[in-house]
Amino acid sequence: MTRAAVGIDLGGTELRAAVVDEAGRILSRAQTRTDACGGPSAVIEQMAALVADVRDAVPGVTPVGIGVGSPGPLDAEAGIVIGPPTLHGWHDVPLRDLLAERLGLPVRLDNDGHAAVLGEWRFGAGRGLSSFVYITVSTGIGGGIVVDGHLLRGRRGMAAHVGHMIVEAGSDVVCSCGNPGCWEALASGSALDRAGRAAAAREPGGTIARIAAGQPVTARHVMTAAREGDDTALALVGREGRYLGAGIVSLLHLFSPERVVIGGGLSNGLDLLAGPIRATIAARAMPAFRDVPVGPSALGLDVGVIGAAALAL
Ligand SMILES: [Zn+2]
């Protein structure tokens, strides 16, 4: 019989669920837009509906449990979502117990970065490694860290909020956490969105503005303009890569990983970002750390649900 679990990837924008087997294969999947303004009870109802959908699609499979990856900060040991900036009205929600009661299966809750690093470790780009760092670069920057064969958890399981490393102490760019100068404030996809919007406002006849065609400029437009060889976009992508590289240099020095794996929406631009990331590592990491490979996630957008299921498998 197939051993499988349900993985739920709770994001501020998308809510995804899947039945995943012990080889990391997705057997069924479903997703919806997160009712991020509806509060916990609305989202729990959405989760229950998605879990019913994915279970109904594979009636021969009985999941052993449910894993949930949620934005942090959360207390993984107590199963409580403490208060993610992207989920309105969520304060100290005992999500693990509420879901277990609603769905009648054991539930494991962890932050989405921990879930993702577990997914990549068991089934993706981290297979066979004993130390590696996973970062996800999208709206924010999250991550997870495996050191010496263990997931780094820290007090209350809150370790590895890599996006909130302060990389520019004198910066006035404010992060979602309220602090200025965090890595997330300077190097996330949202940071590149903002830089792209400012550039399009400065150059209304430029390539970025033309590609955005009246829509709000996003990092994706900037990437497309850079691929067309637009100098303004290439400069923004270069800066983005250098900021990513600066944070990665600190992670190399702190954790001495065998590999750095990058996922999240912005990793689609890794072909353009890899150059400035590598150049920053070459310039700013101590020599013994410079040869660590930096590469893309193997699981792509599925890392969230596969990693969440891995919590329960
Ligand atoms: Zn922050």
Image: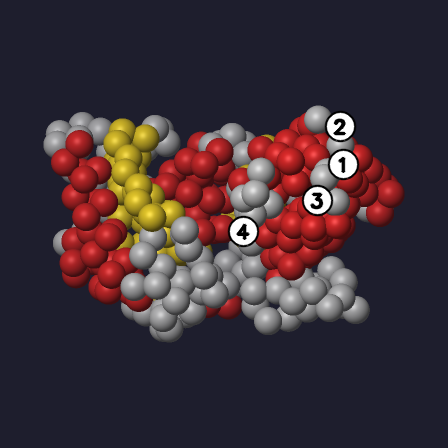
Callout 4: SS:
loop
The amino acid at mark 3 is Pro
Residue at label 4? 139
Does the CB distance between marks 1 and 3 fall below 8 Å?
no
Residue at label 2? 229
Residue 241 seen: no
Is 173 in front, or is 210?
A: 210
Q: Residue 239: percent from the left, percent from the top?
A: 77, 45
Does the CB distance between marks 3 and 4 fall below 8 Å?
no
Q: Count neighbours of disc 3 (C-alpha within 10 A) and say few if under 14, some if 14 to 19, many if 20 or more.
A: few
Does label 3 or label 2 sit earlier along the sequence? 3
Q: Residue 171: percent from the left, percent from the top?
A: 76, 66
Residue at label 3? 204
Residue 236 lies left or right of residue 67; in this view the side is: right
Callout 1: SS:
helix
The amino acid at mark 4 is Thr
